[in-house]
Image (tube, coloured by chain):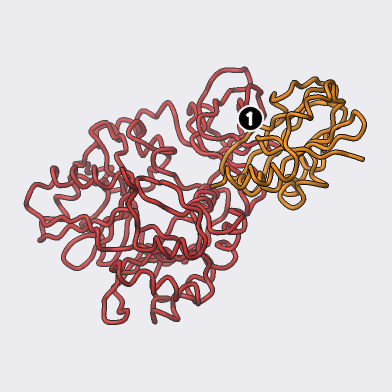
Amino acid sequence: MENKKTALNSLHKKYGAKLVTFAGYEMPIQYSKSIIEEHKSTRENAGIFDVSHMGQLSIKGNNSLAEDLEKIFPTDLKNCKLNQSKYSFLLNDEAGIHDDLIITKVVGGYNVVLNAACKYSDFELLKKLLGDKYEINLSEELSLIAIQGPKAVQILEKIIHTVSELKFMNGNTFNYLDESIYITRSGYTGEDGFEISMKNKYAELFTEKLINGGANLIGLGARDTLRLEAGLCLYGHDMDINKSPIEANLKWAISKNRIISGGFIGFKKIKFQIENGINKVRVGIKPEGRIIARANTVIFSEDNKNIGEITSGTFGPSIQVPIAMGYIESSFSKINTKIFLEVRGKKYPASISSLPFYKKSYVKGANK
Amino acid sequence: MSEVKFSKEHEWIKLDGDTATIGITQHATEMLGDIVFVELPEIGSSVAKDGNAGVVESTKAASDIYTPVSGKIIENNQSIVDDPAKVNSDPENEAWFFKLKITNKSEMDLLMNKEDYEKFSKESSN
């Protein structure tokens, strides 16, 4: 099957992108010779990411919508303020993660941003779960462009006035040319930044404006090192249908009152795991020296017992050491516990690390 | 005069007497991207033509290094282990990988000269 293309495909080519297939899309892995340079320019300046392959779903409905969505998502949506975003999950009955997502309360309903690889199955599942009571639409007409990094706010403010007033995990509608576009202060790099949803026909011009403003195009390669330094999970690697949010160490994303009230898909399992503990949990891992332990690397205890597996691993360009995440038997999950990683048949020492590896610089002030 | 040859696995090899210095080509580093880890063969170990003789890792993935000729390792370049980025900045000079005592000089004849390698690497990147 031929790859799909985002509205920025020709712009990627114009700026020399090396294109790869990702979740059925032709996407830029890098634009320059160096992923590390792209990574650092995001941390020090501002990076532009085409994330239009991700699913942009809208659900419109009346007052009962929040209540019905709470039967699906483990998130407090009834108390979600207008334009507030929340990180959430689509779970199965066993609390396995179908997808992780961002849900934002907008006028007349909710916007949901889904992972590219899951968006069509999520869409079908949500239609099935919600029935025909609500208008639910997965857009093919919208692009999603992220700008991330310490200079993101000043670059975007020059194009969209008052955007700097947005708080972290909050959004709003802004005017651009004769259109209204939706911007949230969010991202997946560990930096302050924004995600801008707009019609496909404006995406190229808008991106050129961001480039003229001083931001650099960043490919999926640096996006991966950025999110891993920030301790953020990549769906399909650090979480999947066989892991629950509790095992993924993402209990914080389940609203406290929902853990008490329940009534969402997977609640029984989550309650059980909170009360009885879990066998395996996601942790941060720092190998000693320079060895890189990638996905599927087996983790051993000091007495040579197989105790888990790496799910993501790379070299952290901003912290200049190798980093990884993985699932490990809970009794070994304490920070600084010494472990061993088997790479190419040899065992290398490592230790459990706190997350994130790289300290975030989000603009705070939003309500949780 | 020393002779420089190239392999299909994108290694370069320079022969001085029976000592061969081996590294990876500029073209190889461009394909790999930022090198962040290097593992070299141990001094004293014997390696066979086209056999595994180290590993490089970029931010994206790990790649094996092969030796284009057989021999016994007499030196390895610790400076690229300590600072793998050197491989990107000067792959065909300072960032050599290892030196070996060549056991069969005729293996050199099976490798490409510079001109042929340039043609080969251009074709293989298309």
In what quadrant of the picture does the N terminus of chain B appear?
Answer: top right
Q: Is residue A120 above or below residue A12?
A: above
Which element carries disc 1, helix, strand or loop?
Answer: strand
Could you say where residue A111 lies in the image, as x and y percent from the top left?
25, 59
Residue receiving disc 1? A338
- In the image, what residue occupies the spot 21% across and 55% down? A138
Tell me the kind of residue under disc 1: Lys
Please name the color used to draw chain B: orange
Q: Is residue A191 above or below residue A357?
A: below
In this image, A17 relative to A255: left or right? Answer: right
Please name the color used to draw chain A: red
Q: Residue furthest left?
A: A133
- In the image, what residue occupies the spot 69% across and 42% down? B117
- In the image, what residue occupies the spot 70% across and 35% down? B7
Q: Say which of A62 and B49 sits in front.
A: B49
Q: Say which of A188 and B14 sits in front.
A: B14
Could you say where residue A298 lies in the image, as x and y percent from the top left?
54, 25
Q: Chain of mark 1?
A: A
- In the image, what residue occupies the spot 39% across and 42% down? A235
Q: Say which of A304 and A212 sits in front.
A: A212
* Mark 1 crowdedness (10 Å alpha carbons): few <14, some 14-19, many ≥20: some
Could you say where residue A221 lies in the image, as x and y percent from the top left?
52, 50
Q: Quadrant of residue B28?
A: top right
Could you say where residue B99 lies in the image, as x and y percent from the top left?
84, 32
> How many numbered circles does the render carry?
1
